[in-house]
């Protein structure tokens, strides 16, 4: 269950989302499956640091929400031969390409972030989708009233 604070009709997800994201980064650091240089480069990038990180098979993934089944709409980074990387995704069947350094891999992911990709939403992908639909409806309604 996600607890959200409401003030003047606005939902404050900041504290809940920030705490979950930071805990996620600590979990990824602690599990040791992702190369340290990649984690440091990803965490140093503000647009990625605000997303929820998760790992699988040594890969570094990023989610727009903190609850499982995380989102699959952001490319992810895989370790490759030597100290290089391979960027794929967002789906497993999609390939972005090779990266010689962690910084190159991070840049490739950042270039492909979804529009409006902001701080991770504290909740599941379904809750995120419902929130985005409600926000879009509100914007549409406001636009129609001012037209």
Image (tube, rainbow, N blue to C red):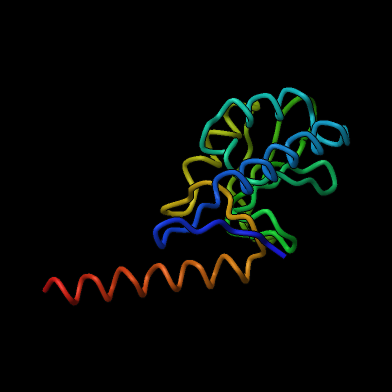
Q: Which corner quadrant holds the C terminus?
A: bottom left
> Residue 62, relative to residue 4: is it above or below?
above
Q: Residue at x 77, y 36 (%)?
A: 79
x and y percentages locating residue 118 in the rendered image: 48, 48
> Residue 93, relative to residue 48: is it above or below?
below
> Residue 140, relative to residue 66: is it above or below?
below
Q: Is residue 55 left or right of residue 43?
A: right
Q: Residue at x 69, y 37 (%)?
A: 22
Compare residues 93 and 129 and report the one nearer the observer. Answer: 129
x and y percentages locating residue 3 in the rendered image: 65, 59
Q: Is residue 124 left or right of residue 27?
A: left
| Residue farthest toward the left in the current orientation of the protein | 147
Instruction: Kindly indicate the quadrant of the structure image that contains residue 89.
Output: bottom right
Q: Residue at x 55, y 56 (%)?
A: 5
Count the numbered circles shown.
0
x and y percentages locating residue 110 in the rendered image: 51, 40
Instruction: Kindly indicate the quadrant of the structure image that contains residue 106.
Output: top right
| Residue farthest toward the front in the current orientation of the protein | 8
Compare residues 58 and 28 and report the one nearer the observer. Answer: 28
Q: Is residue 134 left or right of residue 129?
A: left
> Residue 102, relative to residue 63: is it above or below?
above
Q: Residue at x 68, y 53 (%)?
A: 66
Compare residues 82 and 143 and report the one nearer the observer. Answer: 143
Q: Which corner quadrant holds the N terminus?
A: bottom right
x and y percentages locating residue 115 in the rendered image: 42, 54
């Amino acid at each position: 269950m996600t607890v959200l604070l409401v003030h003047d009709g606005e939902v404050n997800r900041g504290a809940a989302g920030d705490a979950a994201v930071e805990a996620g980064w600590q979990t990824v650091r602690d599990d040791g499956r992702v190369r340290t240089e990649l984690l440091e480069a990803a965490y140093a990038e503000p647009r990625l640091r605000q997303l929820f990180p998760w790992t699988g098979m040594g890969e570094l993934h990023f989610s727009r929400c903190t609850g499982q089944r995380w989102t699959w709409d952001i490319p992810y980074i895989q370790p490759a031969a030597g100290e290089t990387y391979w960027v794929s995704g967002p789906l497993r069947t999609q390939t972005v390409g090779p990266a010689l350094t962690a910084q190159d891999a991070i840049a490739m992911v950042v270039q492909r972030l979804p529009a409006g990709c902001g701080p991770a939403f504290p909740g599941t992908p379904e809750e995120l989708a419902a929130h985005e639909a409600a926000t879009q409806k509100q914007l549409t309604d406001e636009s129609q009233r001012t037209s």
